[in-house]
Amino acid sequence: MDSRCALCGGPPHPGAPLALCLTHLLEAHDWVAGEFGMTDLLPSPCVFCGSRLGVRYPSGWLCAVCEWRVGEVPPDDPAASRVDVVYYLRFRDRIKIGTTANPAQRFAALPHDEVLAFERGDRTLEQRRHAEFAHLRIPGTEWFETDESLLAHVASLRAPTPDPWSLLARWRSESAARA
């Protein structure tokens, strides 16, 4: 590393990854925080999804999970944030493909070991998935045998966000914001 600050010629801050003095490192930090936000704990849980993780910008806080702006009141109308999803539940060695707008309530009535994924969609998409994996379907049910094609589909749904619940929270927040 250079022995002088690249901007002012002063001594670089010890251990800094760039040849910058403390003043210029702090200026760079402030710029990054203003441009990209700083991840931190929210002052209080998100009123929309309950998360404590937030991103602080000079203009205010956003929930890091659902991107709800801190201080904004969620809609009174539950329909404003309704999101229909196709869900994938694992129970032992089988996977259920179903649809709901209220996963927590629906899952309370279903035996399952793990929520694998959510996919934004309604009965039409659910029926397409049932047809796509019909060769795995256990007759008379919405449960499917597990094989590589179904596991690959679930993995593709989980790739951008491994936690299905945080993805659902984001979709609900976006829906409410549009309403």
Image: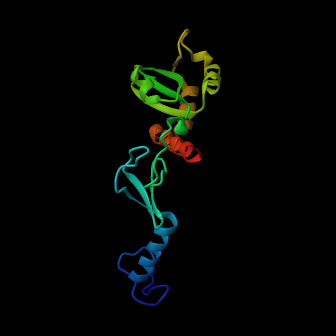
Where residue 5 sits: x, y (%)? 45, 85
Quarter of the image holding residue 133? top right
Direction from residue 87 to residue 135 in the image, left or right: right
Q: Residue at the top extreme?
A: 140
Quarter of the image holding residue 111? top left
Direction from residue 9 to residue 119 in the image, left or right: right
Where residue 99 sits: x, y (%)? 54, 25
Q: Residue at x 56, y 31 (%)?
A: 84
Where residue 81 sits: x, y (%)? 52, 39
Q: Residue 116, can we see it?
A: yes
Residue toward you, 171 or 32: 171
The quadrant of the image that shows the C terminus is top right
Residue toward you, 99 or 129: 99
- The answer to whether 21 is drawn above or below residue 143 in the figure is below
Q: Residue at x 42, y 86 (%)?
A: 3
Residue toward you, 3 or 139: 139
Q: Residue 21, can we see it?
A: no
Q: Residue at the front extreme?
A: 76
Direction from residue 151 to residue 112 in the image, left or right: left
State how many labels appear. 0
Direction from residue 122 to residue 35 in the image, left or right: left
The quadrant of the image that shows the N terminus is bottom left
- The answer to whether 52 is drawn above or below residue 20 in the figure is above
- The answer to whether 151 is drawn above or below residue 161 in the figure is above
Q: Residue at x 52, y 33 (%)?
A: 118
Where residue 50 sits: x, y (%)? 38, 44
Coloration mode:
rainbow
